[in-house]
Amino acid sequence: MKNGLCPGIIGLDSEEKYKRLFSAKEGNAASFRSGHVVLKAGEGIGEHNTGDFEEILIILEGKGELYIKSSGGTPEKVRIQEFAKDTALYVPPDTLHDVKNTGAGMLKYVFITCPACVKDQQKCTSVTYCAERGCEQVKRPLYDYIYGPVPSWRLGSSLGVDLLSQEEKICVFDCVYCQIGSTPIKTVERKVYVPTEKVIKEIKSLPAGLSIDHITFSGRGEPTLARNFGEIIRKIRELRREKIAVITNSSLMRDKSVRDDLALADLVMVKLDAATQECFEKINAPADGIRLSDLLEGIKAFRSEHDTKLALQIMFAEMNKDEYKKLAELAFEIRPDEIQINTPLRPCGIKPLSKHEIVHIKEYFEDLGRKTGSISKIIVVYEAEHKRAKAIDRRKTLKRRGSPQ
Ligand code: SF4
């Protein structure tokens, strides 16, 4: 068969939440991706954005709601579309959306996404076909691995570097508050996802006069999964003067080589959202074998081995707010330079805590800090100044941030 593609058949009797069907990514389709989704009563797939892909949902069983929050990079009112069995729904490209089961039984559907190329609908049958013919729609993205700059309450104007840059998010965690949706590929495997030269080529082609405070390793997943992140930090240093930050979920910091590479940055922001293993599993849903004690051991070892500026980021929500006292104790055991008290204000699957609750938590941290003689600076998301920044490519940025701000 042409391009090695063959006819195929896959059963739809799965009860798995997410099962991939025919897909260009799997190599058993030319250009689209498809999957079978099963959601229990009350369950949602999680907010996500298919970027340049348009999507069709074919409802096989149950009923639910489709939430659409933004389109074309412009925030819009939330739109809710109710649906039931034997219907098909269309989701335009570049749209932040979520699907929830509102029935008492299972909701089952098949989704199909495809590159939304509108240039020549008669001929544009695959990305490869379009790219070979120099189609502008395919050539349009200037940057595949760099996004922003985005306004960050912690980093000012932050240019993101996404060293995973896969169609689907790859992470060690599946945090309930993740703004880019659930984690289809949960792994601890470190490897080169994007060759160093490709990232450096994009860094070299940045427009002159771009206002950046930090070049930040973050994006669609955990940056330390990229085995070459240390090498890329070194090479960026030779080219740019901005400070370099890495935002990590701390999951791989038990590995000394990860810690040594992190130390090449100017600022390392580590995540700690739970003080107990039970809460850790609920809020961060880590990959098998990752324990809270691994994070703590790794962060503390980093602190004792390196002078690199260390910030501890704690995301508070309903499910971990009762652990704030224990988290404060752990924070001061770590002795970071900065403690960042956060709550999910950007669109995601859960509600943020109120300003009142966050300020109460901050005051507890401050009291304990005074008692323990800590010199950690404490900042909270509600009180931070939000610097303005203009992204080079809003669509690519939205894909990594889940919202334009
Ligand atoms: S660690 Fe970050 S990217 Fe990974 S699931 Fe949590 S919030 Fe999302």
Image (cartoon, rainbow, N blue to C red):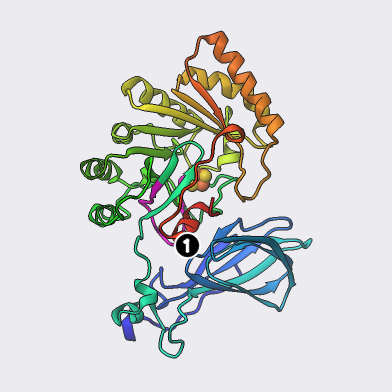
Could one spot residue 173 in this view of the protein?
no
| Residues packed near mark 1 inside 10 Å, few (<14), some (14 to 19) or many (20 plus) | many
Name the residue: 44% across, 23% down: 337
Per the image, the residue denoted by label 1 is 395
Could one spot residue 88 in this view of the protein?
yes
Name the residue: 35% across, 56% down: 145
User: Which sits in the foreground, 388 or 376?
Assistant: 388
User: Which sits in the foreground, 363 or 383?
Assistant: 383
Q: Position of residue 198 (x, y in %)?
A: 26, 57
Kindly indicate the quadrant of the structure image that contains residue 393: bottom left
Q: Amino acid at mark 1?
A: Arg
Single out the residue that lies furthest toward the front: 209
207 w.r.t. 132: above or below: above
Name the residue: 64% across, 63% down: 38
Which stretch appears magenta? 159-172
Q: Position of residue 59 (x, y in %)?
A: 67, 73
Single out the residue that lies furthest toward the bottom: 122
Q: Is residue 25 magenta?
A: no
Single out the residue that lies furthest toward the right: 104
- Number of marks present in the image shown: 1
User: Which sits in the foreground, 89 or 13?
Assistant: 89
Q: Main secondary structure of the magenta part?
A: loop
- Asked whether, in this view, residue 245 is left or right of residue 32, the answer is left
Label 1: which secondary element: helix
195 w.r.t. 29: above or below: above
User: Which sits in the foreground, 29 or 152?
Assistant: 152
Q: Position of residue 110 (x, y in %)?
A: 60, 72
- Which quarter of the image is occupied by the N terminus? bottom left
Kindly indicate the quadrant of the structure image that contains residue 344: top right
Q: Position of residue 203 (x, y in %)?
A: 28, 52
